[in-house]
Amino acid sequence: MTNEILKINDLNKSFAKRKVINKLDLTVSRGDIYGFIGANGQGKTTTIRMITGLVFPDSGEILINGKSVFNEKKTSLKNLGAMVEAPRFYENLSGYENLKLMANLIDNVGEKEIQEVLELVHLSDRQKDKFSNYSMGMKQRLGIANTLLGNPDLIILDEPTNGLDPNGMEEINELIIYLAKTFQKTFFISSHLLHEMEGICNRIGILHQGKLCVEGELKELLFQSNVANLKELYFQKVGYHHA
Ligand SMILES: Nc1ncnc2c1ncn2[C@@H]1O[C@H](COP(=O)(O)OP(=O)(O)OP(=O)(O)O)[C@@H](O)[C@H]1O
């Protein structure tokens, strides 16, 4: 078992003639809460869609636990749970019914595990409510419950706190930290919310112009760059542009 749970080597992706991802290298180690940070349109979602096998790169390599997402798709993706953009569920089904449908797609996931993941995200007592009646925070938590089905080691969350109020954000952040500490889950979280990321991530990578302009342990990066926080680090590395 490799300590590098996610490894991206020399990844490239263009749409029409626009290069979005340009020689991207990235490493996530087991146990990290990794913040994948970048401004709007820098290619975070595109990268995540490539990691989850939804989009094909032009070239390069993505390994999960040392297994290629493109050459060994089934084995590599078995160890991955992902919530890409907003979680998509059936509005007229309950939270439970939605999870049950997702669980049916995964080998060896039964009733017990569905109830366990609902408990973990604090939705047990609302599992029979229709998804359409859930608050945004509840919808995100159901999305995270879905990523936990099948007990993967690596969880990818694309902007998990986008649109949530401070209380909803705190709930999601606490849940991520709890799952990482209690079940040794590794998280790869994309966001442009610097303060949020600083609060939960041990390691970060800043995506700028298609590649990482900085990657490493957050505390070390702040120390080495002689800055007080992630926001200062971000502007030091990326620069400040008037819109
Ligand atoms: N299928 C597609 N066809 C053409 N262009 C695309 C496609 N998907 C993404 N792009 C373009 O690629 C660039 C990166 O988009 P992406 O959604 O990956 O960025 P992002 O960092 O996730 O941004 P945001 O924070 O706004 O979600 C954008 O310019 C976008 O318009």
Image (cartoon, grey):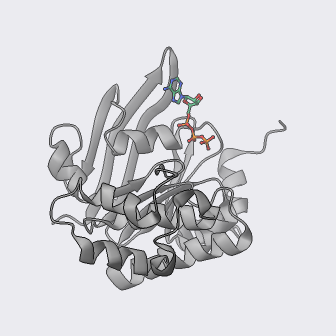
Q: Is residue 201 above or below residue 44?
A: below
Q: Residue at x 49, y 15 (%)?
A: 16
Residue found at the far top of this picture: 17
How far across and how far down the image is residue 89, in percent? 46, 51
Q: Residue at x 64, y 75 (%)?
A: 170
Residue 217 is at least partly visible in this image: no
Q: Is residue 104 above or below residue 187?
A: above
Between 237 and 150, which is closer to the camera in this rendering? Answer: 150
Task: Pick the quarter of the image with the C terminus.
Answer: top right
Residue 49: quarter of image = top left
How far across and how far down the image is residue 119, in percent? 41, 81
Between 92 and 45, which is closer to the camera in this rendering? Answer: 92
How far across and how far down the image is residue 13, in percent? 42, 28
Residue found at the far right of this picture: 242
Q: Residue at x 24, y 57 (%)?
A: 104
Q: Quadrant of ligand 1?
A: top right
Residue 240 is at least partly visible in this image: yes
